[in-house]
Amino acid sequence: MLEHMSGSDHSEVVAVINRSMPIIIRKKSVLKCEICNEEFKYNIEMKKHSKRTGHTLPYTASDDYQELHKCQACEAKFKSSVSLAAHLKSKHKQKAYFCLEERNLIRQGFPVKNLRKKCHYCSDNVVLKSVLELKEHIRTVHPDIRKRCPKCGMSFILFQEGHQCLFSTDSQAECYFHEVLHSEPHKEYRKRQDVEILVEKYPCPLCSKSFTKKSLRQHLRVHTLERPFACSTCGANFTTQSSLSNHCKNSHQPRISENFPNKIVVPVTNRSDDWKCTKCSKTFSNRSGCSRHRCDAGRRCPHDGCSFVASTPAHLTRHRIFHGEQIKNYECTLCPFKTNQASHMERHIRCHNNLKPYACPHCNFTCGSLENLRKHVLKSSRHQGMFLYQCPLCDFQCNTATDLRAHLTNDHPDHYTAKTAVQAVKMILMKGPV
């Protein structure tokens, strides 16, 4: 095995193992039934489909193509050379090794797959040892011969490379744009000066709109919030090159006076002290720079060692809770009570005002919160077997507001809609002011 791998036939495999050459990964091809055009990923699925429907089995899914590894000592068949090698060792006490590249057993009497490739562009009979050498040969000897993708226009050396797109980019919008180019555009005719012009539109993969190729690239940046064109003077970012050019022309280039064409008027900029952020006291040389400034003074995490900057004050509050803070933004003006939920503060204010808007439907009991009313009806021994909610139109009873809302909208659609059912359920247990 060592002598076989050290030979010239497998120098590429050794180079890959030593990480001195990139591995070329080929995309799996889709299998299609010739009769019903149903697609499959694996030959075993195609074989089951043909057995179930009676359709013609393609050659790639046949036994002659799939069962390449046959034991010469018996009638056993195996799907892989590894299984055949184990079978020979256990059943027939024979030593056998398999080649990683050829996928064939290396043993006397076993055939070895021929990996040599012929160059079809050379007039002479030029045969290369492998497909990698063929690719390098075409790249150096025939540099003008390329396979080109009809959709995106990318070129490939070998035909099988065209089945996978090698396009890569750092921009999410450009990646979406390139994927759309692989699809067929929607064609429509427009009249311009009594002449019909064919216009091709591509659908946006992120919404339901369609655009021309130029407009789609700009539209995708609206979804991805990308501004790839940056001003080298002030650092402002723009979605298109034309917007950047207009910005540089209007903000950073001197103007020519209309009254005196030969006189250049340089815009007078205010002192940096005149344009100052009111939150962080940062100064700017002009008004536009100050207006573009996004101050994070009130959105930065106050904990030492944490560089988190929130997008909103509510986002910062949620982040500070992760640090273990007990943030209570709602304070009572009548007592020291504090809470982090508005509903708790409303319930607390009712206690100060001695309000009890919730009433028991079975007795004269009233309370200030729905939680206490539920405990009174469902958990106490005063109303055993009773329900909390009663339908005003029929005898339906339940203990949750969700069930009652579903009952009103499903069983009484003539009287309640989804919006009016919510308000009706809310007012069923309310007997006084909130």
Image (cartoon, rainbow, N blue to C red):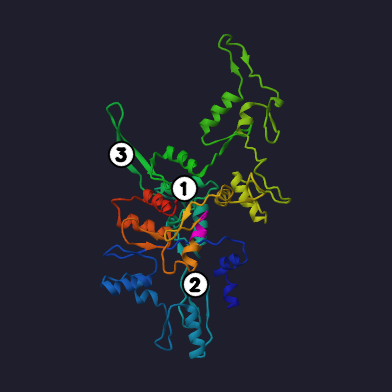
Residue 249 in percent (x, y) is at: 57, 24
Marks 2 and 3, Cα distance to the nearest angstrom? 52 Å
Q: Amino acid at mark 2?
A: Glu
Dot label at residue 6: none
Farthest residue, direction top? 259
- Residue at image location 42% in from the left, 69% down from the top: 385
- Residue at image location 59% in from the left, 48% down from the top: 352
- Residue at image location 40% in from the left, 78% down from the top: 67
Tell me if mark 2 has few (under 14), some (14-19) or many (20+) residues whose alpha carbon lies within 10 angstroms of its own: few
Q: Quadrant of residue 163?
A: bottom left
Q: Which residues are magenta?
A: 367-373
The N terminus lies in quadrant: bottom right
Residue under numbered circle 2: 102
Whether 298 is drawn above or below 281: the answer is: below
Farthest residue, direction right? 304
Marks 2 and 1, Cα distance to the nearest angstrom? 38 Å
Name which of mark 2 and mark 1 comes first in the sequence.
Answer: 2
- SS for dot 2: loop
Residue under numbered circle 1: 176
Residue under numbered circle 3: 188
